[in-house]
Amino acid sequence: MPIRIASLTHRIAKNGAMLHKATMDRVHSLGADHEPSEAEQVLAEERRLLKEERAKRQAQAQQPRAKAIDKLVRTHHPQAKEKPWGNKEPKEAKKATAGKAHRPSRAEKHAAQAAALQAASRAAKKSAKT
């Protein structure tokens, strides 16, 4: 996922803080008239690249974007296609198959379960009596 412009601004700020610290370290240790250290040069180059990238992204954000209406695909055809209506034969009706007419409903399942429980309790009573 590309880095947003705000992320680049944050990275530039962090880079600027590190660059300032490196510059101050050089000034306090060697003096202001010495050349920048290699760390300072690397940080300055990175800062320049980050600023260029931010400017490029800002310019890209200003470009007009495609609108939803432009992205729509035209689905309507101005003239209807010719269809061979006369070639179709009428479908035959399905024959009824032997077996169950339908699957048992929820109520039928519960009724069967209740009947099985009653039969089991009757069987248990009979075995307890004998």
Image (cartoon, rainbow, N blue to C red):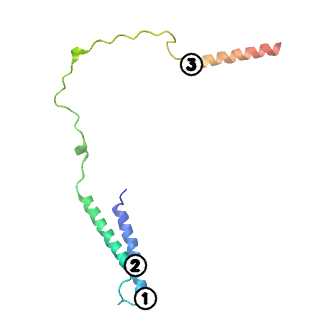
Nearer the camera: disc 1 or disc 2:
2
Question: Which residue type carries mark 1?
Answer: His
Work out whether mark 2 precedes mark 3 in sequence or the reverse, and give the earlier one: 2
Q: Which mark is residue 39?
A: 2
Q: Secondary structure at mark 3?
A: helix
Q: Earlier in the sequence, mark 1 or mark 3?
A: 1
Of the numbered discs 1 and 2, the one sitting upstream in the chain is: 1
**Location of residue 18 (image quadrant):** bottom left
Which residue is disc 3 drawn over?
Answer: 107
- Amino acid at circle 3: Ala
Image vertical order of residue 81 relative to residue 42, above or below? above
Residue 97 image point, x, y percent? 46, 10
x%, y% of residue 73?
24, 39
Q: In the image, is residue 75 above or below residue 84? A: below
Residue 28 - label: 1
If the image is split into quadrants, where does the N terminus sit? bottom left
> Quick one: label 1, few (<14), some, or many (20+) residues within 10 Å?
few
Cβ atoms at labels 1 and 3 below 8 Å apart: no
x and y percentages locating residue 61 in the rendered image? 27, 59
**Crowd tier of the residue under label 3, counting other residues whose Cα lies within 10 Å: few below 14, some 14–19, many 20 or above:** few
Question: In the image, what residue occupies the spot 23% across and 34% down?
Answer: 75
Could you tell me which residue is drawn at 41 percent across and 90 percent down? 30
Q: Which mark is residue 97?
A: none
Q: Residue at x 22, y 14 (%)?
A: 86
| Residue at mark 1 to residue at mark 2: CA–CA distance | 15 Å
Q: Amino acid at mark 2?
A: Ala
**Please, which residue is most extreme toward the front here?**
38
- Mark whose residue sits in front, 1 or 3: 1
Residue extending furthest toward the left: 79
